[in-house]
Amino acid sequence: EGKECILDVKLILNHAKIINIELQVYKQTYWGERSLLYWARAYDSLKSEEDYGKLLPTYHIGILDFTLFEDHPKFMAKYQILDVEDGYLYSDKLCIKVLDLTQLEIARSQSEADKKLLKWASIFKAETLEELELLASGEEVFENMVVTMKKLSEDEKIRMQCEAREDYERSLLTEYNAGKSEGIQQGIASERRNTEKERQRAEKESQRAEKESQRAEKESQRADALAAEVERLRALLK
């Protein structure tokens, strides 16, 4: 069940920054586009009477159990808008971070890896409550998280799953559409071949039926001629 769910959390931290966190275990072709859209939605938080100065720095954090860029695998990546020539930061209000859980084992072997980040990644990779409790032992923030998880009622779990289900199904549809273009072309070619075979078979059937019709017509004519001959002989014998 956990493999189907998408965790999506949006929060405002100390009235100073907006953080949108997504946990996704199902590989998505358009995650980059999706993360930009989710960031934009979170950033667009102004009320009608507020000016642009009220816009808060907004962070989108993707916790992924797949590698986003196969040619650029990285345990933790941070993306912002920069000048492509000298790296000057355009604005600190756009920040997208990606935590790649598939790189956890590699990160553990790197001395410069953030130990706290390794702990969080290990917790996200945990598959049982017992494993979570073991990882959380001795650290209050993690222990509190496990306690909260234990307190979740079955109804709340179901509600959370239902809320995530629509997004999950949309993800599946996106992946299907992304992958079916080639399949459509193959299917069209296959359908054309099948259609041509069906046309040829139908044509042969039509020709066979025509021959049968002609044969039946000849038989009918022969029967009529025979019947006429019988009648002629009867007339002669009278």
Image: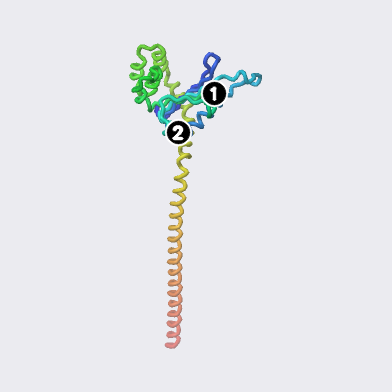
Q: Is residue 92 above or below residue 174?
A: above
Q: Secondary structure at mark 1?
A: loop
Q: Secondary structure at mark 2?
A: loop
CA gap, disc 2 and disc 1: 29 Å
The residue lying at 45 percent from left, 63 percent from top is 203
Q: Toward the viewer: 34 or 134?
A: 34
The residue lying at 43 percent from left, 64 percent from top is 204
Instruction: Name the residue tied to disc 1.
Output: 89
Give the number of the disc on residue 227. Answer: none
Q: The residue under label 1 is which amino acid type?
A: Leu
Q: In the rendered view, does 84 fall on the left or right side of 101? A: right
The residue lying at 46 percent from left, 48 percent from top is 185
Q: The residue under label 2 is which amino acid type?
A: Gln
Q: Toward the viewer: 95 or 27?
A: 95
Number of the front mark, 2 or 1: 1
Instruction: Name the residue tied to disc 2.
Output: 28
Residue furthest right as drawn: 49
Category of crowding for the residue at label 2, using alpha-carbon neighbours closer than 10 angstroms: few (below 14), some (14–19), many (at least 20)? some
- Point out residue 141 in the picture as x, y percentages from the top left corner: 41, 13
- Mark found first going from the N terminus, 2 or 1: 2
Q: Quadrant of the C terminus?
A: bottom left
- Point out residue 114 in the picture as x, y percentages from the top left corner: 40, 18
- Point out residue 65 in the picture as x, y percentages from the top left corner: 40, 28
- Point out residue 64 in the picture as x, y percentages from the top left corner: 43, 27
Q: Is residue 217 above or below residue 136?
A: below
